[in-house]
Amino acid sequence: MFHLLTIPAVKKKLTWKTIWIIALPIQWLLVLWASRNPDWVERYYSNGLYQWVSKALRILLGWIPFSVGDVVYLTLIFLALRYLVLRFKEIRKKPLNFLGNMVMIISIVYFIFHINWGLNYHRLSIDWRFGIGREYTKEQLVQLTHHLIQQSNAYQFKITQDTTKRVEIPYDKTEIYEKTIAGYEVFQKKYPDFAYPYPSLKTSLISLPLTYMGYGGYLNPFSNEAQVNGKIPLFRLPTISGHEVGHQVGYSAEDATNLIGFLVSAENPDPYFKYAAYNHALAYCLSDLNRKDKALFETMFKKVNFGVRANYQELRDFWDGYENPLEPVFKSIFNAFLKVNKQEEGIQSYNSVVGLLVNYHERYDF
């Protein structure tokens, strides 16, 4: 007599780990779609969902005097190293399980990054926002450089009453941040979509590592805190803080936030901020002119007050003091990150602000 054996179907529970692993390629495809539809990103994300997410995070964390995002980063690094040390044997025995965990973590981070801020890389560009171009001639560059030399010299002399003295900002970092926020209040009267309620602008707890990596600051995409490298000479901080807040209000591209940092500082009523703006913009233009026509650069540079040059030397001495063999590695990593996120010029996009400055000046003057 034969007995019929019933074998129950094996039901495998769908775990969160599996869901996140499956979600990673789906997320990638959605981001790829977004990158090809900047109008949609501009309307529904940058001017929609992101505004709510950004404000919520700034309300939640902006009042805390230290960088919560930096604390989280440092904690996660410690926990990751601890996990690798304590579970090393287990990882060697079950490498596929470890790989699955890594893919799950990457998927979660990828999701949070793009929801919290990263999709702004795929919005319409800043030149579309201001109705300007990017192309420029050498003659236009020379005209703008001459204008910036005049403005830098004028504010340097107004502040110091001596063409040979470098400008020393009399404010501490907290006061600079407060004046940056006040500058955005002025700027939003001209451009309402640059309103900056519930500020979250702080000195980074990892300023020393940032200095060795060669960065003036960064926007934490997970906590939406604008981080400034507190070790950089103070005369440079107004434009850096304006730059990082530019990221916060929704612009990811570095050339865009360089332009925003300049405009917010140049339109600030404080003369030290105006000097910082023109000094920084002049540095970009002189550098670009030096690449295009070295002889012309040398002629133009002779017109720069010795006090303005002294500030450039101060900044050069600062960075030289932290030069190290790993800095190019960090820059290469960031360069690759920018290119992945639709910044074709990579780290050179910082310098492409010159085209934006030339065209903005041609249309609106400053």
Image: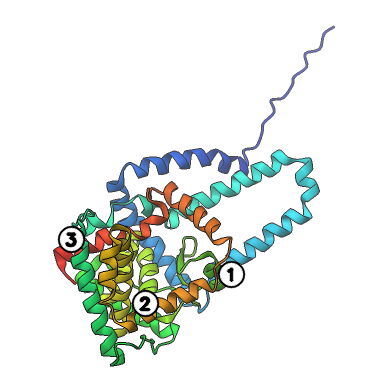
* Residue type at tag 3: Glu
Spot occupied by residue 280 in the image (x, y as percentages of width and height)? 33, 72
Residue sitting nearer the eye, 147 or 361: 147
Residue sitting nearer the eye, 316 or 94: 316
Residue pictured at 36% horizontal, 44% vertical: 34
Quadrant in which residue 347 is drawn: bottom left
- Tags 2 and 1 touching, CB below 8 Å: no
Q: Earlier in the sequence, mark 3 or mark 2?
A: 3
Residue pictured at 77% horizontal, 13% vertical: 4
- Crowd rating for badge 1 (residues with CA inside 10 Å; few <14, some 14–19, many 20+): some
* Residue type at tag 2: Pro
Q: Which mark is residue 139?
A: 3
Quadrant in which residue 169 is drawn: bottom left
Residue sitting nearer the eye, 53 or 291: 291
Please tell me whether mark 3 or mark 2 is closer to you in this view.
Answer: 3
Which residue ends up furthest to the left in the rendered image?
363
* Residue 263 visible in this rendered orientation of the protein: no
Q: Where the C terminus falls, by quadrant?
A: bottom left
Q: Where the N terminus falls, by quadrant?
A: top right
Q: Earlier in the sequence, mark 3 or mark 1?
A: 1
Residue indicated by mark 2: 238
Q: Earlier in the sequence, mark 2 or mark 1?
A: 1
Instruction: Please tell me whether residue 324 is drawn above or below residue 113 in the rendered image.
Output: below
Which residue ends up furthest to the right in the rendered image?
1
* Residue type at tag 1: Val
Instruction: Please tell me whether residue 66 is drawn above or below residue 159 in the rendered image.
Output: above
